[in-house]
Amino acid sequence: MNNDQVVFSVSKLNFYYGQTLALSEIDMLIQPRKVTALIGPSGCGKSTFLRCLNRMNDTISGTRLEGQILLDGEDIYAPNIDLALLRQRVGMVFQKPNPFPKSIYDNVVFGPRVVGMTNKKAELDEIVERSLKQAALWEDVRDRLNDSALNLSLGQQQRLCIARLLAVQPEVILMDEPASALDPIATLKIEDLIGELKRDYTIVIVTHNMQQAGRVSDFTGLFWLGELIEFSVTAAMFTRPSNPVTENYITGRMG
Amino acid sequence: MLSGMRTNFDRDFDTISQDLVAMGARVENALEEAVLALSKRDIPRAKAIIAKDTEINALRFKIEEACIALIATQQPTAGDLRAVIAVMHIVLEIERMGDHCAGIAKTVILMKEEPLLKTLKKIPKMGTLSQQMLNDCIQAFLKRDTNWAREIAARDAELDKLYRAVFNRLVKIMAESPELVTRATYLLWCAHNLERIADRVTNIAEQIVFMRTGSMGELGH
C-alpha cells in the first residue's frame, strides 16, 4: 500500500499504563473511507489502541507511548500538535450515548461554535440540518429541534452524538462499541449509518460483536494480549483466517 | 488452544455429520445393489433401488435444512463456516450419486431379459472401485484428511480409463453388429453413470480440502 493512500500509519506502537505494557509493537495502516474494525477479548488493548488515535489516553495519568502514529503523514504526538484540532479531525463516539443536557439543536451546534466555525444563525441552521441528515436523524427530529436531547431514545441519542461530531467536519470517526447499549433495531440503524458514512469518512470501530465487525467493516484487526495478531480484509478473516488464535477466537473456541 | 467451547455448534454439526455418513452408506448400498441388479438381471432389485432413492433425496433436504438452521442460529465463521458450506455441497453430490444408481436400475428395467454382453466384466469393476472411493471419501471427510482426499481423487483416473475401454469396446460392437446397438447403448448408459459417480467422489474430495484449508480448486485432471 502506498502511504499516500493511508489516513493513519501506526508503527512500532508500545503503550504503557504505568509499568504495564498494554500494547506491544503495533503496526497498522488505516485506509481512507473504509471501515476498520478492531476485535478481541476484554482487556486485549483494542480500546486503548483506538484512544491512541486521537490522544484520548493523554487524559489518563501515568500512561506512556512509544512508536509513531502519523495522521495524513503528520506525527500526532509531536510537541506542536493542537489537541483540540486533532480531536476535531478525529472524532469519537462512545459506548453510551452522551448528549449534553441541552436541546437537540444546541447539541449539534456546540462544536461549530466552540471551534469558531461560525456564529451566524443561517449557517448554524444549515449545519444542523446537514449533520442530522447525515446521521439519519433529521426526519425523526426536524419538528422538535428545541426539545431536550435527553428525551430521545437511546438509539436516537447515539445518532445525535454522531451528528454532533459530523458538525465539525471530521476526517476520521472513532467508535468505541457504539451499539452495545442499543436494541437490535437501533443497532441496525447505526450499522446502516456506518455504511453511509464511510463514503465520506474513515471509520475505526471497536466492537465485541464479531458479527457486527463482519457486517460493517472492510478490514478487521484482532488484538490479543496487547498484540495485533491478525489484520486483514474482513471477508478473508471471517472465512479463512491465517492465525489459529484468530480461528479459535472468531469461532468462539477461546475460553 | 482451547477447543470444544462451542458446544451448541459442535453438537449440531455432529448430528449433521452422522446424517451425512448415513446418507453415504445408503448410496454405497444402492451402488452395490445396482451393479448386482445389472449382473443378475434382477428387476425387483432394480425397482427397490429406485424406491429407496426417495429416502436418499429426503436425507439431503433434511441435512440442508439443518445446515441452514445452523448458519442462521449459530453464525459460524472461518473453519466452522467452511465445514457447513462443504457439507451442503457434499450432500448434493451424494444425492446425485443416488440418482446415478437409480439411473442404472432404470436401465436394468428397460433391458428386461435381454442377454448381457461380454464387456460387462469391466462394469462391475467400475462399481467396486467407485464404491470404495465413496466409502473412503466419507471417512476422509470425518477425519478432515486432505492427503487422503487427494489420493482418492487421483483414483478417478483409473475409472476414466475403464470407462474409455468399455466405451471403445461397445462402440466397436455397435459398428460390427447393428442388432446389438440397443443392448450396447444400455450398457454404455450404465458405465457412464458409474463414471459420473467417481467424478462426484472427486468433487467431495475437493470439498474436504476446502473445509480444511479454505482453498478452492479442482483435484485430479
Image: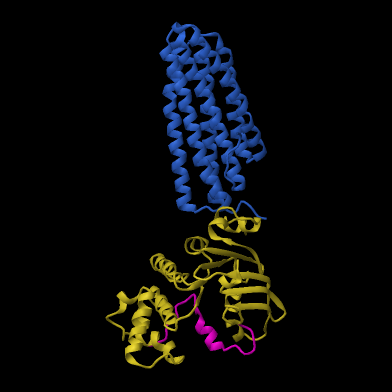
User: Is residue B30 visible in this depiction of the protein?
Assistant: no
Residue A157 at x, y percent in the picture = 40, 77
| Farthest front residue in view | B175
> Which residue is nearer to you in this view: B109 or A182?
B109
**Chain shown in yellow:** A
**B160 horizontally vs B100: left or right:** right
The residue segment tinted magenta is A76-102
Quadrant into which the N terminus of chain A falls:
bottom right
Residue at 62% across, 72% down: A45
Q: Is residue A91 above or below residue B31?
A: below
Residue A110 image-quadrant placement: bottom left
**Chain shown in blue:** B
Residue at 55% across, 36% down: B203
Residue A63 image-quadrant placement: bottom right
User: Is residue A171 visible in this depiction of the protein?
Assistant: yes
Residue at 49% across, 63% down: A212
> Which residue is nearer to you in this view: B210 or A34?
A34
Residue B151 image-quadrant placement: top right
Residue B53 at x, y percent in the picture = 44, 26
Residue at 63% across, 77% down: A69
Residue A28 at x, y percent in the picture = 62, 69
Quadrant into which the C terminus of chain A falls:
bottom right
Q: Is residue B151 above or below residue A42?
A: above
**A188 horizontally vs A243: left or right:** left
Any magenta on residue A67? no
Q: Is residue B147 above or below residue A222?
A: above
